[in-house]
Image (cartoon, helix red, strand yellow):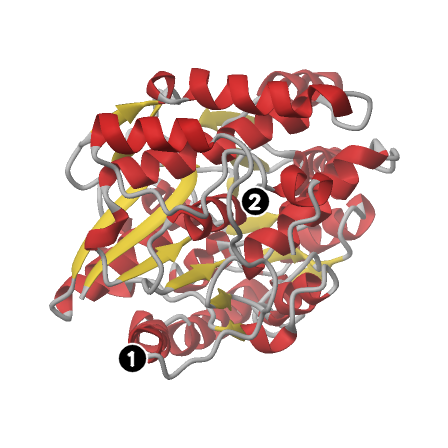
Amino acid sequence: MKILIATYWILPHVGGVWVYIQDLKASLERLGHEVDVLATHPDEQSYYLVNTGQRVRKEQFMPLVGGEIRATYAPHHSLISPWIVDQEIEFCTYAIAAAYFGLEKYDLIHTQDVISSRAIWQIKPEGIPLINTIHGCLATDYWTSLEGKAPPESIWKYACAREYYGATSSDYSIVPTKWLHDTLAGYLVPPNHMKVIPYGMNVKHYLQRMNEPSDLKLPDAANVIVCPARFDKVKGHSCLLDALYKLKQRRTDWICLFVGDGNLREELELKANRLGLAHHVIFTGSRNDVPALLKQSDIVVLASLNDNHPFTVMESQISQKPIVVSDAGGIPEMVEHNQTGLIARAGNSDELAHCLGTLLEDPALRKRLAANGYKWGIKRWSLTVMEKLTVPLYENLVNKQLVRKVVHPPKHPARHGSWISAQLRDRYNMHIPSSFSIVDDHIMGSVLFNAK
């Protein structure tokens, strides 16, 4: 088969989705399939095929798309925030870029998020099956990031609609945890439209990377705690800093590495200084030597406020390191308290500090949890198992043995932007279905124009 793996997110990046895509691509190619990967380019101004470098700039399509969408939504400006309009323009520009690369040459498309799923579902040729893996719930992440504040009603409705339309814009969905399965069901995604397939990882490759040299030198005398996670509110770094402040009152023979980056970095650095943790917390930035850093660590910690199936947990278990986690999202499906790790309630810095202190004080417990976690991880996080569960779904879809469980959202004749589609067909010889609309079938358009 010729397969397209597609995501709206930037690739490459330091994170679980990129690891998943790389491992999936390698597995499929080992089985004899041909695989392309479509993503947003790191320059954020273009989309590209990661494996070939073929690229198209957003500005090639965005002015046409933006003008049509803004003009169509103008009479409804009191109902639609500028942020939603920008999201719709991004949706549609991504869809047209995907068509520009030629979707008709693929036997199957596997999208990796609700945005790419919705966009490609609308513009792909009929008959080419589309399966998606949903790696998390953007709406739930958004709610968590508000920290108790009420979201604007229109944006919250849009976020919920994006979750539903994105997940159901596929012939079938894969989700890594039961938690995410049940969460998406709460957004009206039919439960029988989804199959739970936990992530796998290339253990052999990971163990090789653990033995690679790292230029980050750590003090021998200190116990090393590592938190590898992007700087996003849902990852709970602020709560972790509160826990570390409380831990410092008990003992000071430790350092904690914050491995990652993001727009919260300055805020977190200021808070660490304010709490008197400047000599205990090291902000390393994004690094490509995380396996080597975990090898040097004594404890791994993940204080997520919301999470799905974090690779950090898998990697810490394969690294034979004891882990302290929160009970957010799907994490309790990965860690059993006092057996394969310690679990604190999400957002509870007292419990987090207690768990960290307990591990620092009890080397035997650290050793037991690490050994148990490794046994669990080696058995549970097999890439072969993930492959054996995923590839048959491809085959069933291509052979039309899987029947789509969702009636909505169908495609219907375009009412807006048909002149743009015609222009793109003529100028670039692009395959754009007659049903594709610049407006109607995107999230807000489907609400405004009652697409049924």
Amino acid type for the residue under numbered disc 1 = Asn
Tell me where residue 380 appears, x and y as whole percent.
43, 75
SS under mark 2:
loop
Tell me where residue 171 appears, x and y as whole percent.
46, 67
Q: Please rate how many residues cluster around mark 1, counting C-alpha atoms within 10 Å: few if below 14, some from 14 to 19, many from 20.
A: few
Residue lying at 73% horizontally and 50% vertically, measured from the top left: 352
Residues at marks 2 and 1, CA–CA distance in whole angstroms: 27 Å
Tell me where residue 193 appears, x and y as whole percent.
56, 73
Amino acid type for the residue under numbered disc 2 = Asp
Quick one: quadrant of the N terminus? Answer: bottom left
Q: Please rate how many residues cluster around mark 2, counting C-alpha atoms within 10 Å: few if below 14, some from 14 to 19, many from 20.
A: many
Q: From the viewer's perspective, is 78 left or right of 112?
A: right
In front: 201, or 21?
21
SS under mark 1:
loop
Residue lying at 33% horizontally and 53% vertically, measured from the top left: 21
Q: Which residue is mark 1?
A: 399
Quarter of the image where one finds residue 395? bottom left
Q: Which residue is mark 2?
A: 441
In front: 151, or 410?
410
Judge whether residue 136 can be spotted in this image. Answer: no
Most distant residue in the left direction = 32
Q: From the viewer's perspective, is 63 left or right of 349?
A: left
Quarter of the image where one finds residue 445? top right
